[in-house]
């Protein structure tokens, strides 16, 4: 029996209250206010702009390193230095190559990793502040609402259907059942972050893929409080080498915040070869290095988080426009993997989207032809100036660290071209090497010492993750038989290892293997959707309000 849904109509619907989505909403409100000041009829009123956020509050699901290049924010909010919750300005930066026990400091910090003029920030707090500005401007922000599916119409999209609330594990209606809304809009903006479920559906439906497939990394992070004197606010360091081998792309970071807090993390490219490699364990091992251990000694871990990053660059970005819709920010792959920065680009993409939308609404034309102005605008902006020279950067490291560094040097000398342009790659999940011995073995997870290093569940507790246990599983395994047959023998069930929240476990019951899904553990990083070798895991949003709470991260 079809569900009767309440219909709401808006001029603009933005899915995702991250830097890109909020920048789009705020810029639209600013454009409308400017027209009103000059006695002109605005193309859109703020109250006709809706922003959907699946987190419990704006900022709850926002995680990043995070170093803020203020370029985008300065354009959006010129007085941000007086009002934004900025952390310390970067005072010093360094790059270190680590061996298991040794440390080699680069004599000169490579230009992409020089951070003077930037700020060490909590992305969660910054986005919460930005959300306040959006609400003050009169825009409607709806938290605890996730977009479940797109409304496809007339060779484009016409809005979103939100998730049904109040279903039990079996999908049956509970006493508090509330059907999702049919939210229709003249223009729908997808700003869901990395590997957004609606964006994935849209790109697949209309074949909007770029020249290369998108490639990803996972970032795992802890926030520590350390004794006074262990870390200077504004001190920034990046590491390469150990604990990653020379064939695994990635590196670490250590950032000094105010109040003796330290942000420490590890980024790992999701195209490694060993299907039993555990990024969370590698991060824990990083902290045991003498250089890192000395910083953290006597401190305590206070928060934990993980997220995926779109690192494919220019050639991996999908076509970002369709009739009635735009894709912006991380959803569109707009991240500089060489600098490890994307907040400023996300903000700028939101502003460019707002300008395009405003023109489209003023003309009454929301066709793909009209919205293609978004691509022309960002190709004419400093986004292209920043992303074009690093268009082959991540791909250059497919052959390992040393050949990657050699090619990256050539790219800097040739404006991003390097030896080959474009460097063609396959999706990261195709890079696993099959196991020589296909016998299943029980999972042996890293335990940690409980002081410096931690097991996954201890870290997970510090992420603030919460889901209602009695709701449908939001991790859809489309062919579960593969998990206990082919995947056991060929790859040893890598989902047990790549997930940073211990969502997936292979358990033996009555001499039979079964995949156990601990959906309540999910931190919404989407790694499973990305890295599963058979691409049979489909991540969809759980009931709105579920997930991590990255307060202060």
Image (cartoon, rainbow, N blue to C red):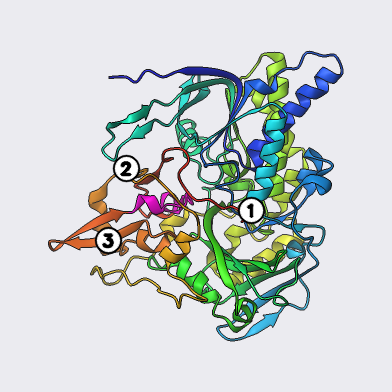
In the picture of the structure, the residue carrying the numbered disc 1 is: 421
- Give the number of the mark in front: 3 or 2: 2
Residue at x 50% of width, y 51% of height: 548
In this picture, which residue range is highlighted in magenta? 518-530
Picture mark count? 3
Disc 2 on helix, strand or loop?
A: loop
Taking 181 as reference, is 231 above or below it?
below
> Percent from the top left, x then y, of residue 238?
67, 69
Query: Tags 3 and 2 in contact by the CB under 8 Å rule?
Result: no
> Percent from the top left, x then y, of residue 346?
67, 43
Give the CA distance from mark 3 to mark 2.
22 Å
Mark 1 Cα within 10 Å, few/some/many (few <14, many 20+)? few
In the picture of the structure, the residue carrying the numbered disc 3 is: 506
Q: Tell me: 326 left or right of 120.
A: left
Among numbered discs 3 and 1, the one appearing first in the sequence:
1
Residue at x 27% of width, y 61% of height: 506
């Amino acid at each position: 029996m079809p569900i009767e849904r309440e219909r709401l109509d808006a001029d603009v619907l933005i899915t995702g209250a991250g830097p890109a989505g909020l920048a789009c909403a705020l810029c639209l409100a600013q454009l409308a206010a400017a027209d009103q000041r000059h006695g002109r009829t605005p193309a859109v009123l703020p109250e006709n702009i809706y922003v959907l956020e699946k987190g419990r509050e704006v900022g709850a699901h926002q995680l990043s390193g995070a170093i803020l290049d203020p370029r985008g924010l300065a354009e959006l909010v010129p007085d941000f230095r007086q009002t934004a919750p900025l952390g310390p300005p970067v005072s010093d930066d360094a790059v270190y190559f680590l061996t298991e026990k040794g440390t080699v400091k680069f004599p000169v910090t490579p230009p992409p990793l020089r951070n003077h003029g930037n700020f060490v920030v909590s992305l969660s707090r910054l986005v919460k502040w930005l959300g306040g500005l959006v609400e003050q401007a009169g825009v409607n922000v709806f938290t605890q609402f996730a977009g479940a599916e797109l409304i496809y119409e007339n060779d484009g999209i016409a809005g979103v259907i939100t998730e049904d609330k109040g279903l039990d594990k079996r999908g049956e209606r509970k006493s508090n059942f509330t059907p999702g809304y049919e939210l229709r809009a003249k223009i729908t903006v997808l700003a869901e972050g990395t590997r957004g479920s609606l964006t994935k559906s849209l790109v697949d439906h209309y074949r909007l893929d770029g020249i290369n497939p998108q490639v990803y990394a996972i970032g795992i992070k802890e926030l520590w409080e350390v004794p006074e004197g262990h870390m200077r606010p504004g001190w920034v360091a990046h590491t390469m080498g150990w604990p990653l081998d020379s064939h695994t792309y990635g590196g670490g970071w250590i950032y000094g915040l105010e109040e003796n807090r330290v942000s420490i993390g590890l980024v790992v490219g999701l195209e490694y070869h060993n299907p039993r490699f555990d990024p969370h364990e590698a991060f824990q091992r990083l902290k045991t290095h003498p250089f890192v251990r000395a910083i953290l000694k006597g401190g305590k871990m206070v928060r934990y988080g993980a997220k995926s990053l779109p690192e494919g660059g220019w050639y991996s970005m999908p076509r970002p426009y369709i009739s009635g819709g735009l894709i912006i920010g991380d959803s569109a792959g707009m991240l500089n993997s060489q600098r490890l920065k994307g907040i400023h680009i996300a903000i700028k993409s939101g502003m460019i989207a707002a300008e395009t939308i405003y023109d489209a609404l003023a003309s009454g034309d929301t066709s793909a032809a009209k919205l293609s102005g978004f691509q022309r605008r960002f190709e004419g902006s400093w986004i292209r100036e920043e992303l074009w020279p690093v268009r082959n950067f991540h791909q250059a490291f497919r052959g390992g660290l040393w050949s990657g560094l050699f090619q990256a040097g050539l790219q800097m000398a040739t404006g991003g071209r390097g030896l080959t342009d474009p460097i063609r790659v396959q999706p990261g999940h195709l890079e696993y090497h099959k196991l020589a011995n296909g016998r299943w073995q029980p999972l042996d997870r890293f335990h940690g010492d409980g002081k410096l290093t931690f097991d996954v569940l201890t870290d997970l507790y510090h992420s603030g993750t919460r889901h209602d246990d009695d709701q449908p599983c939001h991790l859809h395994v489309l062919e579960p038989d593969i998990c206990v047959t082919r995947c056991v023998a060929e790859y040893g069930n890598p989902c047990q290892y790549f997930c940073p929240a211990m969502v997936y476990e292979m358990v033996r019951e009555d001499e039979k293997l079964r995949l156990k899904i601990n959906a309540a553990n999910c931190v919404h990083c989407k790694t499973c959707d990305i890295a599963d070798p058979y691409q049979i895991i489909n991540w969809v949003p759980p009931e709105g309000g579920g997930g991590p709470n990255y307060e202060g991260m």
